[in-house]
Amino acid sequence: MNEEKLQYPPIDEKTGRVICQICGKNYLVISPKHLLKHNITHRDYTKRYPNAPLSSKEFNAKSKYGRVKDLFTPTEADPDELEEVIVNEQPHIEDYMDIDKILKEKSYRDPVKESKSQVLDSLKVYFTNVRPNYLIEEFGPQSGRLLHHFITDFADPILKIIIQFPNTFWHNRDVHIDPLKNQKLEQTGWKVLVVKGRSPSYKDIQKVVDAM
């Protein structure tokens, strides 16, 4: 797919939000789910408009500190519908974040829950049905015998995609290690994505998803 000239300014000057080059609407982040409505994949969009950012600075900052849910008030959209929030109207949140305040609040939270929750929020941008600590049990179609029993870090059972973070301290490790685990899962229709790093960032996740 050839590179095309930007149809709209990449960023809205008033809100700082990114502009979809296909529909011209402003978003905190242009997700694969939104691009699906335009019949284009996330990868093809970046190839067509390499100079158009996919996420705003506001979204990146809130993703980094695990505060994506704070982008919305209870009467606004659910984080699962992030791509549906058009910000041509006045947002109900502050344009700038008090980072020192956020870091202070983080010191009173469970670090395990905080880290995994932060990753889950980032994954929801790409996989609407993603679930943490998902158990996969595969049975033989004829024998009915249990083929394998694996616990994942995250999985989207609808798309049959598994996202593993093997180097994090909250990684779910199977009791009995099977070196052929990924191969067995792929044979039964699952796609396994592996995100490396002890403290994965939104960009780390984005790289792995883009390489799908």
Image: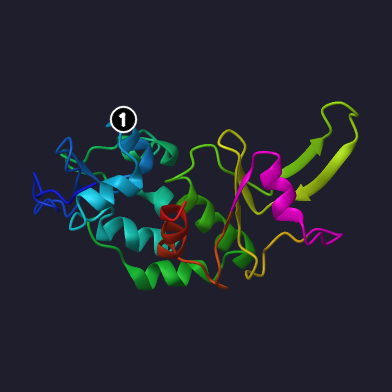
Residue at the limit of the structure toward the top, as seen here: 142
Name above or below for residue 184 compared with residue 194: above
Residue 120 visible (yes or no): yes
In the image, taking residue 73 as reference, residue 196 lies left or right, namely right
Residue shown at 37% from the left, 73% from the top: 100
Q: Position of residue 105 (x, y in %)?
A: 48, 66
In the image, taking residue 147 as reference, residue 201 lies left or right, namely left
Residue type, mark 1 in image: Lys
Q: Nearer the viewer, residue 139 or 16?
A: 139
Query: How many tags in the picture?
Result: 1
Residue shown at 68% from the left, 63% from the top: 171
Q: Position of residue 74 (x, y in %)?
A: 40, 37
Q: Position of residue 12 (x, y in %)?
A: 12, 50
Q: Residues within 10 Å of mark 1 (few under 14, many from 20)?
A: few
Model colouring: rainbow
Q: Position of residue 24 (x, y in %)?
A: 14, 38
Q: Would you say residue 177 sits in the magenta stretch?
A: yes
Q: Quadrant of residue 196?
A: bottom right
Residue 72 visible (yes or no): no
Residue shown at 55% from the left, 72% from the top: 197
Q: Secondary structure at mark 1?
A: loop
In the image, taking residue 129 as reference, residue 52 lies left or right, namely left
Q: Nearer the viewer, residue 10 or 95?
A: 10
Name above or below for residue 150 compared with residue 194: above
What segment carries the magenta color? 174-192
Residue at the limit of the structure toward the front, as seen here: 1
Mark 1 — residue? 37
Q: Nearer the viewer, residue 67 or 28?
A: 28
Name above or below for residue 134 compared with residue 198: above
